[in-house]
Image: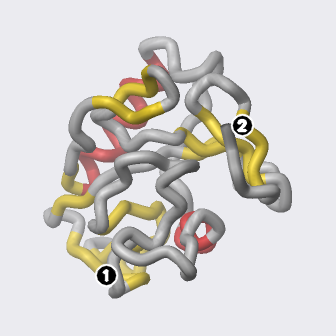
Amino acid sequence: MADDPRFFDNGDGTLTHLDSGLTWMRCSLGQQWQNNNCRGQARSYPWLAAQQAMATLNREGGYAGAQDWRLPDLSELATITELRCRDPRINLRLFPRTPSTPYWSRSKKTANHIYAMDFDRQGVIIKTAQDTALVRLVRGRH
């Protein structure tokens, strides 16, 4: 159950951010939503492999009845950052078992440098496409 009035719990492992209309997976790729918790290990991907994992998920039936999941841009990731929380800077009741580590965005600085959101103290960072980061998918406005 979502405990933040900014989010609506869709009851299927997703939350909708009411201000933006974006729907978020509550778990990172590699984890499964079971019994109101994220089970398993979040998986790290190089940036291109993250894109491929997203495409595979959508092609093979999607998630929560939708097949239009995508990587969020940096400003979208900022909507789920919770500055009053520490290590990680995200509400763990809404997004359980989120590691304090970088998550890919689709926002690029250059062809080989991608912005990521580090839910630790660092916030926005730049990684090369060959580096690895975790993935949380979103759907809705672009």
Q: Quadrant of residue 43?
A: top left
The residue pinned by badge 2 equals 9
Q: Position of residue 134 (x, y in %)?
A: 30, 54
Q: In this rendering, is residue 3 above or below 105?
A: above
| Crowding at mark 2 (Cα within 10 Å: few <14, some 14-19, many 20+) | some
Q: Residue furthest top?
A: 61
Q: Disc 2 marks which amino acid?
A: Asp
**Picture residue at 43% right of the left edge, 14% below the top:** 60
Q: Nearer the viewer, residue 44 or 113?
A: 44
Q: In this rendering, is residue 29 above or below 102?
A: above
Mark number displayed over residue 126: 1
**Picture residue at 31% right of the left edge, 46% below the top:** 50
Q: Nearer the viewer, residue 72 or 19?
A: 19
Q: In this rendering, is residue 60 above or below 83?
A: above
Q: Position of residue 86 (x, y in %)?
A: 41, 77
Q: Disc 1 marks which amino acid?
A: Ile
The answer to whether residue 43 is left or right of residue 103 is: left
Q: Quadrant of residue 77?
A: bottom right
